[in-house]
Amino acid sequence: DTAVSQTPKYLVTQMGNDKSIKCEQNLGHDTMYWYKQDSKKFLKIMFSYNNKELIINETVPNRFSPKSPDKAHLNLHINSLELGDSAVYFCASSQARMNTEAFFGQGTRLTVV
Amino acid sequence: GQQVMQIPQYQHVQEGEDFTTYCNSSTTLSNIQWYKQRPGGHPVFLIQLVKSGEVKKQKRLTFQFGEAKKNSSLHITATQTTDVGTYFCAGRSRGGSYIPTFGRGTSLIVHP
């Protein structure tokens, strides 16, 4: 039973398109995150949602919009895709406390052509 | 803001050699976590260190947290091909956000 699941696993799309990536966690965590991992493996946090409220947004272009219908889901919508958006996107979740670990989804490899 | 630096970026070793990756923070940390990401996989939590000078072991892996709680290291003794992957440290600043800041990771390549 997967703890953090995201779909799709692979996404190939053309520049200018709009796409969404879905994420769900069944761990009962109250915080969910989106990370972008570039080709050099750098994990950059994009968003964090706590109890359905956005609490951090690390200078991400406004073409990216997180949507959380409930605390078990955090979807990522991307408008007007650009070549530079190609990366692996990871969803993660944790409890909103200092001494808790993050659980990551399997990742979505986005390729913009 | 908080920065977490990790070195080296890559490390090639022969199977059986030891490996160490180092993590340094610009601020005092509340705790530090280590994650491993296998090729094509996702980061998986390994361990958390909380106390100043703490040392923890997991089989061939030894994790240390500095006395000043600003640096940490992961040492693998006698590497095996199953150790291949990218190791990340992630720190939380004392008095700061609970959202961890990840280092850039160290990719370990083990040659048989």
Image (cartoon, coloured by chain):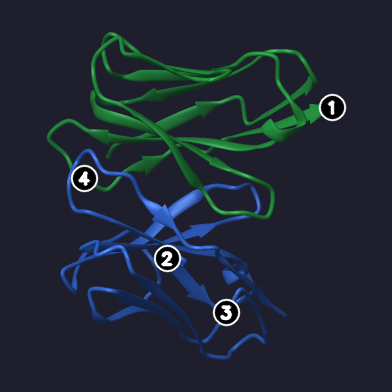
For image coordinates 15% across by 69% down, the residue present is A51
Can you see residue A95?
yes
Q: CA distance from mark 3 to mark 2?
A: 13 Å
Disc tally is 4
Q: In the rendered image, which quarter is residue B91 located in? A: top left
The type of residue carrying mark 2 is Val
Of the two numbered discs 4 and 3 in the rendering, the one whose residue sits closer to the viewer: 3
Question: Mark 2 = which residue?
Answer: A4
User: What element does badge 3 sit on?
Assistant: loop
Q: Colour of chain A?
A: blue
Give the answer, above or below, for where A88 lies relative to B34.
below
User: Which one is nearer the viewer's eye here, B27 or A72?
Assistant: A72
Residue extending farthest to the right is: B112
Residue B111, which numbered label?
Answer: 1
- Residue linked to disc 3: A8
Chain B shown in which color? green
Give the label on residue B98, or none.
4
Check the image and report above or below for B64 versus A20. Answer: above
Residue lying at 49% horizontally and 50% vertically, measured from the top left: A43
